Amino acid sequence: MKLEEWLKNTTRLLADSSIPTARLDCLVLLEDSIGKDRAWLLAHPEFELSLTQAKKLDSLVKRRANHEPLAYIRGKSEFYGREFMVNSHTLEPRPETETMIDLLKSFNCSGPIVDVGTGSGCLAITAKLQFPDATVYGTDIDAKCVETAQQNAKRHSVKVQFFVCDLLEAVLLTPYHLPAIVIANLPYVPDSHTINPAAMFEPRHAIFGGVDGLDYYRRLFVQIDKQASRPTYIFTESLPFQHKSLGEIAGQHGFRQVKAQDLIQVFKLTGS
């Protein structure tokens, strides 16, 4: 089958399955499978796919037609211009989360950093790449996530220490001390909210955060509040309509909001 014909047929299949990025997804799968970039693919519509290539591609397209996230099908996703391994244990990195790195840079924060709920490790690793002299930790309750994060750290040649624990538990234990900066993209979708079909492939415990979506953040601030030495900055991600409530939670534990952009809020320890 010629490339042009395959692309036309599979784009129609995905479009009929209500995949909004049908043609783009087909091109991405072609790039991965054939090993050619998009410009080459578009310039060679006459290229003849082998039977093996077509069979493999059709299998991948069927998975996408079932709304499985493209990142899971590919086993990788991009975050802040870099490629990270992902799988069914980790959330797919969202472009919205990149704002957290932008704000971290704009505040020119110094001191150790901990990424709570690290998942694939994309935030922790990107923070380390942006601040190579900083000590960076990552935590996750899922050991499979930590394994993936460790593989990503090795892939990007950075030293980040990862822990399997509930929120900050392991980092709070001796000989580790609570870092100066906490970055946290915790589950924040309210339990009653309907998520799209692709998100249903992602781990539920990494998406939903209780009745109002903020239960994990409440627990995080309680953990922090118990420490004699608390972080100077806390960066969080949540939905815009949750920002007021999350700001109130932070305020109850001695932090004030100093910045909000898109889904990200930055809280600073009062008096610091």
Image (cartoon, grey):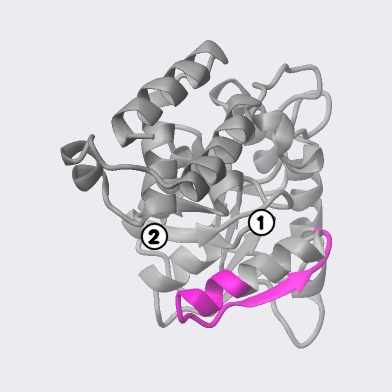
Q: Earlier in the sequence, mark 1 or mark 2?
A: 2
Residue 204 % position (x, y)? 79, 37
Q: Please state which of residues 30 and 232 is positioned toward the viewer in this rendering.
A: 30
Give the residues drawn in magenta, as a range: 151-166
Placement of 216 over or under 158, stated as above or below: above
Q: Is residue 250 visible?
A: yes
Amino acid at pointer 1: Gly
Residue 269 % position (x, y)? 57, 55
Q: Please state which of residues 113 and 38 is positioned toward the viewer in this rendering.
A: 38
Tell me the residue at 46%/25% (across/down).
10
Q: Is residue 168 visible?
A: no
Tell me the residue at 83%/24% (across/down).
211
Q: Please state which of the two labelled residues, at mark 1 or mark 2, is closer to the viewer.
A: 2
Q: Do the residues labelled 1 and 2 touch (CB within 8 Å)?
A: no
Q: Name the residue under label 1.
A: 119
Residue 14 % position (x, y)? 51, 21
Tell me the residue at 69%/55% (across/down).
117
Q: How crowded is mark 2: few (under 14 residues within 10 Å), some or many (20 or more)?
A: few
Tell me the residue at 72%/61% (across/down).
145
Q: Residue 82 carries which label?
A: 2
Helix, strand or loop at label 1? It is: loop
The verdict on residue 268 being magenta is no
Q: In which quarter of the image is the N terminus?
A: top left
